[in-house]
Amino acid sequence: MGCQDSSPATAPETGAPLFRLRLPAETGIDFVNRLQPSDTLNILEYNYYYNGGGIGAGDFNGDGEIDLFFSGNQVRSELFLGEGNLRFRAATTEAGLSTTGWVSGVSVVDINADGRLDLYLCRAGLPDPDRRRNLLFVNQGNDATGVPTFTEEAAAYGLDDPGYGTQAAFFDYDRDGDLDLYLLNAWHDKFNPNIPRPQKNDGSAPSLDRFFRNDGLVDGQPRFREVGQQVGIIHEGYGLGVKISDLNGDGWPDVFVGNDFVFDDRIYLNQRDGTFREVGHTALQHSSRFTMGCDIADVNRDGRPDLFTLDMLPEDNYRQKLMNTMMTWEQYELAVSRGYLPQFSRNHFQLHEGNGPDGIPRFAEIGFQAGIARTDWSWSAEFADLDLDGRLDLAITNGIPRDITDADFINYRYEETQGAFSYREVKQKLLQWVADMDEVRKPNVLFRQTADHSFEWMTGNWGADQPAFSHGALCLDLDGDGDLDWVTHNLEEAPFVWENQARQQHPERHYIHLQFQGEHANPGGFGAEVRLVAGGQPQYLRYEPVRGFQSAAATGLHVGLNTATRLDTLEVYWPDGRYQRWLDLPVDTTHRLSQATAGPPPAPSPAARPLLRPIGTPLWLHEENSFNDFRHEPLLAHMQARMGPALAIGDINGDQREDVFIGGAAGIAGQWLLQQADGRFLAQPMPDPDFEDAAAACFDADGDGDLDLYVASGGSEYNPGTAAYQDRLYRNDGTGQFTRDRAALPALFGSARCVRPSDIDGDGDLDLFVGGGAVPGQYPASTGSMLLRNEGSRFRLANRSWLPALDTLGIVSGAAWLDANGDGRPDLLVAGPWQAPQLWLQQAEGGFVAGDLPEDAGSGWWMSVTPADLDGDGDTDVVLGNLGENTRFSASTSEPLMLFSGDLDGNGQVDPILARYLPGKDGQRRLYPLATRSELLKQLPMLGRRFPSFASFAEAPVD
C-alpha cells in the first residue's frame, strides 16, 4: 500500500552559483577557533564544549567599512578591520581585545552613547566563576594608525555576570530612551537535563537568565542593575537562542528565548509596566526539543513576525537512525504531565496567526510544510533576502566535531563501563571513545523562499556546499555591492567568507540599505520597526542586532526589492513610539534615518470587525484515557485509540438552536453541549462511559420529529470482537433527554471509524453506513464496514449483496452520501488510509457498483469526506481531507510512502512496516523503514540478530 503526496523541494542545477567562497589568503581572516580537550575540560565535563563561537560586526573605527570580531573558546578572540573589497587585517593586539577564558556570544552596542561601537562578550565553560565573568570592551577611539582601542569595563557598568553566558541582547524594554540587557544563560550542572524533572519557575533554579535594567548615568556612565526576579524572568532553562521583537503588536519589545533539552522555550510579553509575563504555553502548541539558534522575521509578508527555531533532525536516513534524540511515548507523557510544552526534535517554523482575544499571539507550526524542518545539527538561523527577489531566504549553519548523540555509543559503549572500572578508568575510556566518534562535518544549508513560507533547498545550487563545523554566522554586505555576503564562524578551521554575486547575476533586481540614528542612550536606533512598499509588495522588518547564534551585527537593515525601481512608501516606528514616513524614494542606495525628525504616530486604523467572536468561556475540554497503543503496537504511526473525539450537531431539544455532542474516550462519558440563548453552551453528560465513542450522527431514527443519536464504538483499548465495541442508539424523548435502546441494533462488535445516515432503500426512513476501523492490535487490517437498514423499531444488517465490497473497503476514515450521477439515488463515497477514494453508485434495482473518480484522487492517507455545493451550480462537490503536508511523512508520485504488512514472525499479529524514501549514507535516495531500531525490535525481536547495532540498521533499506 502507498500514499502519494508532495515532498520537500530541491531546486534543479541551474547557472552559476550565487556564492563564491573567498579563501583566507584572499580575505586576510585566518582566525581558527581550535579546541584543546583536556581531562578537566571536554565534552564529558561540559555539555557545550562543541558549541563554537560567535561573530560581532560593525564599523568599530568609523571608516565606513564593516569590521568583524570572532569569539574564541580556548584561543583568544580576534578582531579584523575591513579594508574594502572583502579584505581585512588583524588588529586584536593593537585594539586591546585579547581575551582569556571561554568566550561564547558577541554583542555589539554603543553602550555609553559616545558614537563608537563597543563589544559585550559572554563567557562560559570554565568552573572558576571569575574566569566566566562577562567582558565589556568600551571603545576609546582610534589610535594614530586608525585602529580602535578598547578597555575592559564590565565591572564598572555592573555587567560582569559570572553565569554560563550564551548571548546578550540590548534593547529598550521600558521605552525610557536607554538600552537594557537580557542575558541568556546555559547553566552547567551534573543533573541530566533531558529528564523532565518538576519545574522550577519561581526564580529558585540556578539555571536562570538574567535581566539588567539600565538605571541611567552614575559618575558619567550607564549603570546596570540585575532585576530579573523583579521583572518576571524566573523560569529555568538552558538558553541557546534569544530574539527581541514586538510579538503582539502593541509597540513594546517582547523576548523569545530558545532553551535546550527538556526546558520550554519562553515567550516573555512586555506588560508595559516594567515587567514581563511568560505566555509560551498559550502562544505555542509545541516547540523544538533542543532549541539552538533562532530568528524572528515577517516571512510571509503579512505584517506579523514569524518565529523559527533550530534543532537536530537530519535529512538523511543514516543520521536519523543513529541519532538518539527521540522521546518515547512514556517520556513524552511524563514531560507533559509535569507541565512541559510538547516538544519534538526538529526545526520549528511558527507562523504568526494574530493575537487571541487575550492579546497573546498565536502561532501555527508549519516546518514540514515549509520544507525547513530537517537540517541536521544546526546552530545559526537567519532570514535574509540573499537573491534580492523581495522574499526572505534562510541561511543555516551546521555540523559538530563529534557525533555525541550516536545511539550505539550511548546504548552500548556506555553500558560496557558500568561496574567494571574505577571512575578514572571509565572517564578515560569514554574520552577515548569520544575521540573515535564520527565527525558530523556537514555543508551549511541555504533555502530560497519560492512562495509565501515555502522554501527550496539551494545549498548546492548556490555554491555554499563546503562541509564544516559552522556555528555563529551573519549575512552582511561586506563589499558594499548591494547584496548580502555570508560569514560563518567555524571550529577547527578559518571562518568562511561567502561572496554573494546576486547583483552581477540579477542586475534587474534592486535593494535599499537603511541606517538608523537614534537618540539619547540608544544612538543605534535598536528596536526601530520598518514598514515599506516597493513594486506593490509590502515588507515589515525590525532592527535588532542579535542574529542567528551567539552573533550580532550593528550594521542596519538590508532589503531586497526585486525589480522595483522606486520605493513607494517607507514608514519607521522608533522605539519610543514616534513615527516617520517617506514617499517615492530611490533604490540601490543607503538611506540614513534620524529619530530627531520623527513625530507622533498616525491614529490607528479602526480594527476590522472579526468574522467570529469568542463566546467568552471555554466549551468543554476533552479528556483522554491513558491507554498506550505503542506498548502493544510499537510500529504504529498514530495511536488508533486517539482518533476521536466523536462530534455530532443538531437541535435536540427543539429550541431552534443547534447543540453539540462530543464523544468520550473509553471510561469517560461523552457530553452534550446545549446552546443557550446568549450563545453560550451548557454541558450535559451522556452517562455511558464504558465505550470509546469513535463516531456519532444525529438523525430522526424513528420518525417522531426529533433527533436521536447513533454512537459508533471504536478505538483499540479492548480485545477485538468484544461487546466493548457495540454501537449504540439513543432515542430522544423530544426534550433532549436520551435513553439507550438496547434492542435497536444487532450485535456489532467491530471497531468503527465513521457513521453516515441516508435513505438508501427509498422507504422514507434513514438507514446507516458504518465505516470500519482497524482491528485492535492488527493494524492495518480492517474490521469491515456495514449497511444498516431502518425497519422502524430496529436496524438490521443489509444483505451483503447490496454492497459485496463492505468487507474489503479497508479502514474508512470518512464517508458521505451524495447523488454523484444525478439519478436521484444516494451514492456512497468512502476514503481512508493507504488507498484511493472509492465511489459506489446505487443502481435502480438496488445494490451498488463501483464508479469512477478523477485520476488525481489517488492513493493517500485520507481522513475525511465532506460534500458541499462549493461553486453554487446546483450539484454536489466534495472536499477530501488528506493527512496534509505538515508531517514527517513526505511523499510524491515518484517516491510514495509505503506500508508493508503481514505476520512476519508467525506470532499471529500483523506487523506494519512503514517506509519512505530518504537519502542514504552515500546520498542516494532509497526506501527505508520509518521506525527506529528500538521500535522495530520491540515488535520483531528476531531482527536483532540481523541488525546487531544501530549503525547496521541505519544502512538497511527495505528490500
Image (spheres, grey):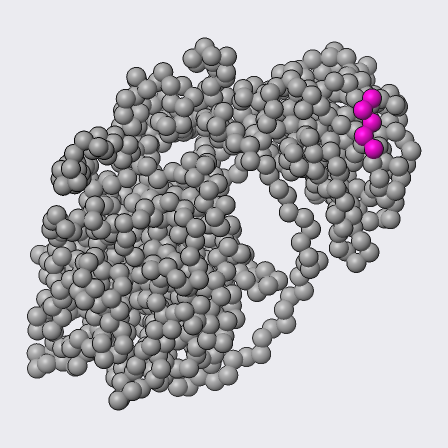
| Residue depicted at x 62% and y 62% | 357
- Which residue appears farthest toward the bottom when viewing the image? 219
**Residue at the image position 19 percent from the left and 37 percent from the top:** 438
What segment is highlighted magenta in the picture? 739-743
x then y, percent, for residue 864: 63, 34
**In the rendered view, does 574 fall on the left or right side of 46?**
right
> Which quarter of the figure has residue 853?
top right
Residue 175 percent location from the top left of the image: 43, 79
In the foreground, 178 or 271: 271
Q: Quadrant of the C terminus?
A: top left
Specify whether residue 364 is in view. yes
Q: Choose top left, top right, bottom left or bottom right for residue 882.
A: top right
Residue 700 located left or right of residue 643: right
Query: Which of 744 and 817 lies nearest the eye of the viewer?
Result: 744
Residue 54 in magenta? Answer: no
Residue 407's x, y, as percent? 29, 34
Say if 193 sits above or below 185 in the image. above
Residue at image position (72%, 42%) is 671
Query: What residue appears at the point 47 percent right and 19 percent down from the top-left corner?
Result: 911
The answer to whether residue 581 is above or below residue 303 is: below
